[in-house]
Amino acid sequence: MRLSARIVGDLRQVLAAEVRAGERAAMTAIRAETEQVKQELRRQVTSSFGGNARGIANAWRSQVFPRSGQSLRPAGLVWTKVPNVIDAFERGALIRAKGGRKFLAIPTGFNAARGRRGRGEKGMRVTPAQMVASGQSFLRPFQSGRGFVWCLPLRQGEQTGQRRRTRLIAGGLTEIGTGNRKGREAWARGMLQRGMLPMFLLLPQVKLAKRLDVKGAAERGLRRLPGRFVAAWERESGRVAP
């Protein structure tokens, strides 16, 4: 039996077309995988810290190289604009007070004017310096003896608005918001009976929980990439339907 074969068409053109298809496939695969890794890292942040961490989640950015044109050797880069924060929660870092200080001052959820954080005077936290300067702050030790709750005395401010909502003032420094709380008046009266508001937790050190897995996200992306590239090349070369 004899077999014969011949190439139909221009071999150089066929090979050149295949290379161009490979370049397009490589760029498509890298672009898609880079975006998927970035979105996974953003989801890690929001699932670990909730909606209040959207700023940290959106700090994850990505870029594909080359920025224009095609290449058989593209690269994808995913990075964060807050690397120290991400690194601390990926490692589960141990944070200690610096500069000879004995304690870390960790603000509580109450420590924001009108009970919210934001821009402008109404969203500023009370600082440790303001606590000291007020002359009204006082400490309550933890039962464990490992730290303190740094408090301000609480008093009632003038009632305002048509509904005459009770205003709570901490040490004359900040107003505590009650307007968006269910049963706000009962909540406000309960706080007044306590007569104090925790503004800071004073701790010698804090061990952060390991909440993020950046390395794992990158490794999963690398494992997916070859299959994604092959599938894209099949489509680009016309061997399978797009």
Image: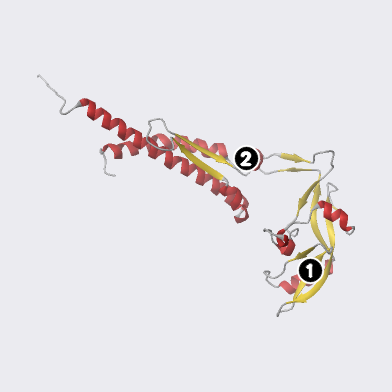
Compared with residue 35, is residue 107 higher up or lower down, i.e. above or below?
below
Along the polypeptide, which appears first: circle 1 or circle 2?
2
| Residue 184: quadrant of the picture | bottom right
Q: CA distance from mark 1 to mark 2?
A: 38 Å
Q: Nearer the viewer, residue 168 or 126?
A: 126
Residue 8 relative to residue 119: left or right:
left
Residue at the outermost right position: 135
Q: Position of residue 113 (x, y in %)?
A: 74, 62
What residue sits right under mark 2 in the picture?
83
Q: Amino acid at mark 2?
A: Pro
Residue 21 relative to residue 159: left or right:
left
Quadrant position of the C terminus in the picture: top left
Residue at 72% of width from left, 77% of height from top? 161
Bin the neighbour count of mark 1 within 10 Å (Cα to Cα): few under 14, some 14-19, many 20 and up. Answer: many
Residue at 10% of width from left, 19% of height from top? 2
Compared with residue 234, is residue 199 higher up or lower down, i.e. above or below?
below
Q: Position of residue 240 (x, y in %)?
A: 26, 40
SS for callout 2? helix
Q: Nearer the viewer, residue 196 or 98?
A: 98
- Res. 139 in view: no
What residue sits right under mark 1 in the picture?
168
Label annotation for residue 209: none
